[in-house]
């Protein structure tokens, strides 16, 4: 039965990775501009155009269906001559792998940057992602998500995030945003933690309010969480390059 399951899984992956015709890019940033703007540790969110992306966007109620981490030139670490490999992602076909920025030219993207990250922790993030290369994608998650494609079921919004808490639980198999979430948890950098507010009595009728952060399980993170996080800065390359609206040429 193992080979039958493998063949069915591979067939499902081929179907889900197929592109949808309705995709329309509105705000595309060239690879050269992305390369000049991105810093190691930045999260690049992508609005995918695959059938698999449709399910993720529906369940998360978000534009962003995929996430990758920018790690800079990692040719030396990979013993490769391909200096264009600057992103690391988890893909349903290839698992965790490195790829060039040019791969996402023509897609709507967003840069989310961790604020105040030390150089040491930034390096630890990059090393964590490099060490992840070769891990497999969690096909159990793919099979579960396939149920939300056609027809789209009326799942209440409050339940949709929990629908993504799926997968085999095998630590050697990951999903795109979960491995990135684990990398930030590795350096104790917050994304969207549970916040517990407590009141502490300090004497003489004085009280202080404290916020205690609780780590969410990495399987619950989705690409849009990096966009929503108050600890990540949204970086727009056009604005970073001294944007002047008065220099624009409009069609009269």
Image (tube, rainbow, N blue to C red):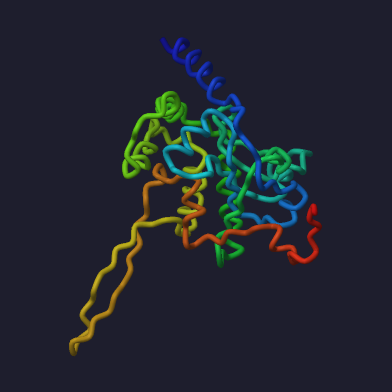
Could you say where residue 246 lies in the image, as x and y percent from the top left? Answer: 77, 66
Residue in the foreground of this view, choosing between 75 and 64: 64
The C terminus appears in which quarter of the rendering?
Answer: bottom right
* Rendered-image quadrant of the N terminus: top left
Taking the view exactly as shown, the residue that stands out farthest to the bottom is 204
Q: Is residue 236 above or below residue 106?
A: below
Question: From the viewer's perspective, is residue 38 above or below residue 28?
Answer: below
> Of residues 189 and 144, which is closer to you in this image?
144
Residue 7, image x, y percentages: 50, 13
Q: Position of residue 203 (x, y in %)?
A: 19, 86
Q: Is residue 70 left or right of residue 132?
A: right
194 relative position to 205: left or right: right
Up the image or down, 21 lies above or below 101; here it is above
Near-viewer residue (66 or 247): 247
x then y, percent, for residue 196:
29, 63
Q: How many marks?
A: 0
Going 53% across and 16% down the picture, which residue do you hit? 11
Horizontal placement of 95 versus 107: left or right?
left
In the rendered image, which quarter is residue 120 located in?
bottom right
Taking the spot 53% from the left edge, 44% from the top edge, the residue there is 63
Q: Which residue occupies the extreme front position in the image?
A: 252
Taking the spot 55% from the left edge, 60% from the top edge, the residue there is 114
Question: Which residue does the image show at 71% across and 43% down from the upper left?
Answer: 101
């Amino acid at each position: 039965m193992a080979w039958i399951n493998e063949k069915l899984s591979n067939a499902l992956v081929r179907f889900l990775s197929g592109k949808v015709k309705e995709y329309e890019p509105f705000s595309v940033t060239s690879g050269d501009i992305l390369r000049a703007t991105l810093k190691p540790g930045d999260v690049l969110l992508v609005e995918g155009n695959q059938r698999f992306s449709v399910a993720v966007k529906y369940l998360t109620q978000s534009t962003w269906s995929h996430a990758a981490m920018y790690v800079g030139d990692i040719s030396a670490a990979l013993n490769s001559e391909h200096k264009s490999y600057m992103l690391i992602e988890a893909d349903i076909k290839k698992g965790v792998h490195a790829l060039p920025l040019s791969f996402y030219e023509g897609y709507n993207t967003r840069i989310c940057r961790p604020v105040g990250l030390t150089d040491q922790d930034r390096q630890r993030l990059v090393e964590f992602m490099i060490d992840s290369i070769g891990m497999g994608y969690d096909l159990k998650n793919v099979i579960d998500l396939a149920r939300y494609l056609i027809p789209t079921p009326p799942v209440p919004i409050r339940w949709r995030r929990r629908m993504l808490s799926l997968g085999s639980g095998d630590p050697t198999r990951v999903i795109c945003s979960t491995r990135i979430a684990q990398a930030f948890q590795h350096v104790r950098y917050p994304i969207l933690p549970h916040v517990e507010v407590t009141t502490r009595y300090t004497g003489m009728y004085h009280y202080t309010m404290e916020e205690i952060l609780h780590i969410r399980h990495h399987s619950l993170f989705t690409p849009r969480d990096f966009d929503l996080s108050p600890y990540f800065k949204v970086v727009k390359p056009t604005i970073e390059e001294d944007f002047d609206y008065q220099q624009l040429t409009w069609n009269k």
